[in-house]
Amino acid sequence: MVRAAILPAVGSPLEIADIDLPEPGPGQVRVRLAAAGVCHSDLSLSNGTMRVPVPAVLGHEGAGTVVSVGEGVTAVAPGDGVVLNWAPSCGGCHACSIGEVWLCANALAGAADVYARRPDGTELHPGLNVAAFAEETVVAADCVLPVPDGVPLTDAALLGCAVLTGYGAVHHSARVREGETVAVYGVGGVGLATLQAARIAGASRIIAVDVSPEKEGLARSAGATDYVVASEQTAREIRALTGGQGVDVAVECVGRAVTIRTAWESTRRGGRTTVVGIGGKDQRVTFNALELFHWGRTLSGCVYGNCDPAVDLPVLAGHIRAGRLDLGVLVTDRIGLDDIPAAFAHMVAGKGGRALIVF
């Protein structure tokens, strides 16, 4: 038995309870969690914005130590530190065949599996494949990657989603070039990672935008050169900060129609707007045909930072070891498993950066 945070049904409060976690079968790995990040995607799963089979144990951003392995597993062994990879690529679908592994058609196939049970026999699904909101979890072997050398195990949890997403949004999706100007909408965990990635890319001006004035210090510690409190005048303020042109790149990390539209309007003619935030189906963004022609901007979605974790984790580790990437800046709260509901409430209220569950 291990303690876990269970989502009994969409829209229901999380329940912290014991679950019966089996030993790993063929091709599986059992991991004792060191830490797990509380991501806005977990909130989206709990409220139905994103759908997964329920009841489920949520949590997809985590790192820990291998406890045991099933038959046929050779890539890791008991005692190894690993980062959980919630979206493993299958290698065989069309997206994988053309190198776009972040769009793998089968990445979330494991979320429909039964991976554990409640003491009364109720079947549980593993959230986004990895069920990181638990003291221990059992995952497919392709859902773990070695923790890079020089990265503390607890901090490594952040590499599993926030950092890969923010880094990839800048370096793979928007492809920020040295000297360009960047605006980042939303100063949560992903937004803070995006700010640092823009600084690493050599952006000349990095403008952070958030509804909360209290986040300015946090944003500047992550690399923001300017801070704008979101309002109806945000796009105009950003154009004023960039000589009337708008930024070369805007990265939206919120997932709201009004924020996406504002990010678009704050991007210069011919610039790039990248949407990282996950919004609901009711969030409609409209454009007219003339403005699409006139402004010549590129608007693109960004899934998991358009990253290949196996390739990008060693790159990120290099930045961490060199002091260019500070994982600690992302974390504003270190909490226990019982504190996840409060962390959800803080996200809804727009407070803080990343909450990190430390086991």
Image (cartoon, grey):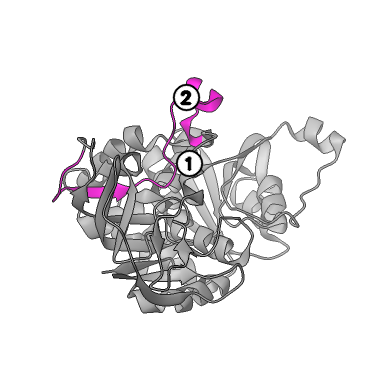
Q: Quadrant of the C terminus?
A: bottom left
Q: In this view of the protein, which residue sits in the foreground, 186 or 76?
A: 76
Identity, as a three-letter code, of the amino acid under mark 2: Gly
Q: Is residue 31 left or right of residue 254?
A: left
SS at circle 1: helix
The residue tagged 2 is 92
Q: Which residues are magenta?
A: 76-102
In the rendered image, the vertical position of residue 196 relative to residue 202, given as above or below: below
From where the camera sits, is residue 176 visible?
A: no
The residue tagged 1 is 305
Please tell me whether residue 267 belongs to the stretch shown in magenta: no
Identity, as a three-letter code, of the amino acid under mark 1: Gly
Residue drawn at 63 percent across, 62 percent down: 48
Prevailing secondary structure of the magenta residues: loop
**Would you identify the image quadrant in which residue 289 lies?**
top right
Residue drawn at 34 percent across, 62 percent down: 36
Q: Nearer the viewer, mark 2 or mark 1?
A: 2
Residue drawn at 47 percent across, 57 percent down: 127
